[in-house]
Amino acid sequence: MTDPIRVLVLDDDFRVGGLHHGVVAARAGFAALDPVRTIAEARAAIRDHRPDLLLADVYLPDGDGIALVQEAAVDAVLISAADDAGTVRRALRAGAIAYLMKPFEQRRLVSVLDRYARYRNLLSGEHAMRQQDVDRALAVLHGAGEASTTPSRSATEQLILEALGSDEASAAEIGERVGISRATAQRHLTALAERSAVDVRLRYGAAGRPEHRYTVRG
């Protein structure tokens, strides 16, 4: 069983920190550490609990969240009401994987968490990677294509088509390449097949049910 992704929330407003903590705790595959309210508390929690992901405010009573991200060597999402380009650039330069401006809808944080989980899955292990594997992981992390107005092809479907390339693969294989479950991959592949974007053939083994194999049409 895969260990849950440990997330530390840092916000000096206990109500806001509690809300973000609740969002994390409600997501399957995540473990929400006790939220903290100061840089000093965050440093201690990072040292003692080694979180995988930090959700940090920028302006805190005893310091700067961006500086903490730069020193902590942990994946981080910076969350702030600051909307000036300089702060955003500084956050990204410090290594933040995302920047969320307050106020935002809960679904936006959920989306960041889900993309991060898929990104980690794609970069798990110590195996050699191809350039397209790196490109796919970064596209997942940054939500490439999610704002597209084209209704017939979602960002996930686009990633599936890219993962197929010129190969033939099963739903399980595609799920592993893209960083999603087999069931999710199967659902999207079925939709793509219904729209004639992919072809399906059955491969019969020695025993058991035949396996569906998919290829990109044309």
Image: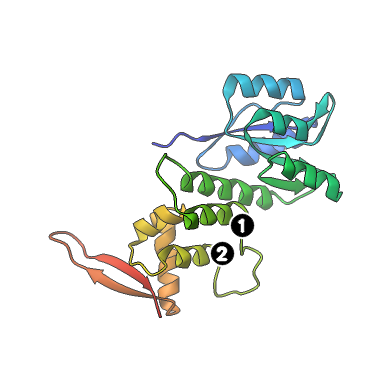
In the rendered image, the quadrant that contains the C terminus is: bottom left
| Amino acid type at image mark 2 | Ala
Instruction: Kindly tell me whether residue 99 is visible in this rendering.
Output: yes
The residues tagged by marks 2 and 1 sit, at their Cα atoms, a distance apart of 8 Å
Helix, strand or loop under label 1: loop
Q: Is residue 57 left or right of residue 160?
A: right
Asked if one can make out residue 102 in the rendered structure from this viewpoint, the answer is: no
Q: Determine which residue is flagged by label 1.
A: 143
Q: Badge 2 local density, few (<14 within 10 Å), some, or many (20+)?
A: some
Q: Which mark is residue 72?
A: none
State yes or no: discs 2 and 1 in contact (Cβ < 8 Å): yes
Q: How many marks?
A: 2
Q: Which quadrant does the N terminus fall into?
A: top left
Rendered image coloring scheme: rainbow
Q: Measuring from the top left, give residue 80's x and y in whole percent.
A: 80, 42
Q: Is residue 90 left or right of residue 54?
A: right
The location of residue 90, given as percent across then percent down, is: 79, 42
Question: SS at mark 2?
Answer: helix
Residue at 67 percent of width and 47 percent of height: 109
List x then y, in percent, for residue 183. Answer: 40, 57
Q: Is residue 151 above or below residue 159?
A: below
Q: Earlier in the sequence, mark 2 or mark 1?
A: 1
Q: Which residue is mark 2?
A: 155
- Density class for disc 1 (Cα within 10 Å; few <14, some 14-19, many ≥20) is some
x, y percentage for residue 187?
A: 43, 64
For badge 1, the amino acid type reads Gly
